[in-house]
Image (spheres, grey):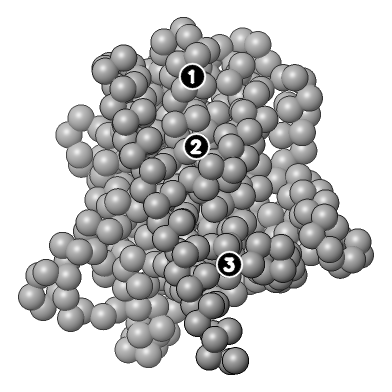
Amino acid sequence: MESVFSYIIGLGAAVMMPVIFTILGVCIGIKAGDALKSGLKVGVGFVGLSIVTALLTSALGPALNTVVDIYDLQLHVFDMGWPAAAAVAYNTAVGAFIIPVCLGVNILMLLTRTTRTVNIDLWNYWHFAFIGAVIYFASDSLAWGFFGAVICYIITLILADLTAKKFQRFYKDMDGISIPQPFCAGFVPFAWAINKGLDKIPGINRLEIDAEGMKKKFGLLGEPLFLGVIVGVAIGCLTCASWAEIVDRIPYILGLGIKMGAVMELIPRVTVLFIEGLKPISDATRSLIARKFKGADGLNIGMSPALVIGHPATLVVSLLLIPVTLFLAVALPGNQFLPLASLAGMFYVFPLVLPFTKGNVFKTFIVGLVVMVLGLYMVTNLSGWFTLAAKDVYNITGDSAVAIPDGFSGGSLDFAGSPLAWIIFQCTENLKWIGAGILVAVTAGMMWWNRVLIIRNAAAMQKADSTEIQTTE
């Protein structure tokens, strides 16, 4: 089983998702050629996105390492990035079985009407495997590992349901789509609470700054492209130890600025491919549901947040948070994690935050600032267990992606910086059976409440259909 799923996951999202979408498209009645075309566009979107994020990390990585050397920053948790976290997740006993286990849970929840999300984002199942793997190594118990993974999966599906309508109203062409990725879902309570709090502060509650407004007010300075160039040039200047060196390295500094600007400009263009590939599948699914399940609440397709990371507000806030997060990593007492490779995952913090802040750049920035501060401490806190898991996987597989330099611990902002992962780990590791009881009670309560909402919405839709028929008669 481990070999089979390791092979499937090893294909990567760019290969997995076209196959999944093609099969799904044919099953819901789309012509085989059209289904294949949709799947290939999604696959090409993943390839394009990986190229753009690789450009970001390859450009920023050496520059930030130079800054670390110049200023002698002594932080001892090495940023391994999400590829290492995914490798750790899938190359464990938990990761080997995570896909069939989670799919079984998803089907059971659909049958019991405790979710309306069909999570086909199989690649991102590594998030559930990751928290399960870390708990497994901390407790030396496979049962505890699967318990943590399943709890995380159930909560994520429910949060995907609860945010689906807001998500679909905010983003265009996303009808019938939800985001069941736990890294994104973990920030939903913060987005809701901080947004509510800011709305009660006089003056700030009338502060409306969205990406389009920034363009109109600041012109070129409000463009993500130009902001990318400015931030890239600023980081390039920090790699120089003196003014004379800045003058000597102007070509490098300007080149870094252009590369950062290119990332900001290319990400929205790449995400268009996801939408083009997704739309026929989404339309056909809604049509099928309308025919087969008349009066039902309607299913949502669980998809990767990569679909919407090209939103201008996400780009602007992510770009502004990169230098701020680096400063916080150095300035915060007790933090030992310096994010470098993880910076490419900054965009994935905000897909489910923007529907709550309505794209307000200021509010979104405040939410991002809070979760980044918490994320740095959570990565530092989990680094010991992450290191234990990574070393075990390295000893078995010899995968260089999970090799940790001597004298360092390992960490990654995605997914170890997620509040959801951290809370589940703390409950299972430190509180044991009491923590497990709390998690079960909270999860059961969320399932019950979600079922109530699903049944209530279905009844409201049936009543509306009945009223429409009587009016027509």
Query: Of helix, strand and loop, which one carries label 1?
Result: helix
Residue 173, image x, y percentages: 59, 74
Residue 318, image x, y percentages: 40, 60
* Amino acid on which disc 3 is placed: Gly
Q: What is the distance, in whole Å, between disc 2 and disc 1 at their CAs?
A: 12 Å
Which residue lies under the disc numbered 3? 295
Which quarter of the image is occupied by the C terminus? Answer: bottom right
Residue 191, image x, y percentages: 30, 57
Which residue lies under the disc numbered 2? 153
User: Against 205, is 238 above or below?
Assistant: above
Using residue 283 as the reference point, say whether residue 151 is left or right of it: left
From the viewer's perspective, is the residue at label 3 or at label 1 nearer? 3
Using residue 111 as the reference point, say whether residue 10 is left or right of it: right
Query: Of helix, strand and loop, which one carries label 2?
Result: helix
Query: Of helix, strand and loop, which one carries label 3?
Result: loop
* Amino acid on which disc 2 is placed: Tyr
Closer to the camera in the image, 402 or 260: 402
At a point 38% along the width and 43% down the height, the residue shown is 448
Q: Are marks 2 and 3 in contact (CB under 8 Å)?
A: no
Q: Which mark is residue 350?
A: none
> Is residue 163 visible to us here?
no
In the picture as drawn, the residue positioned furthest to the top comes out as: 140
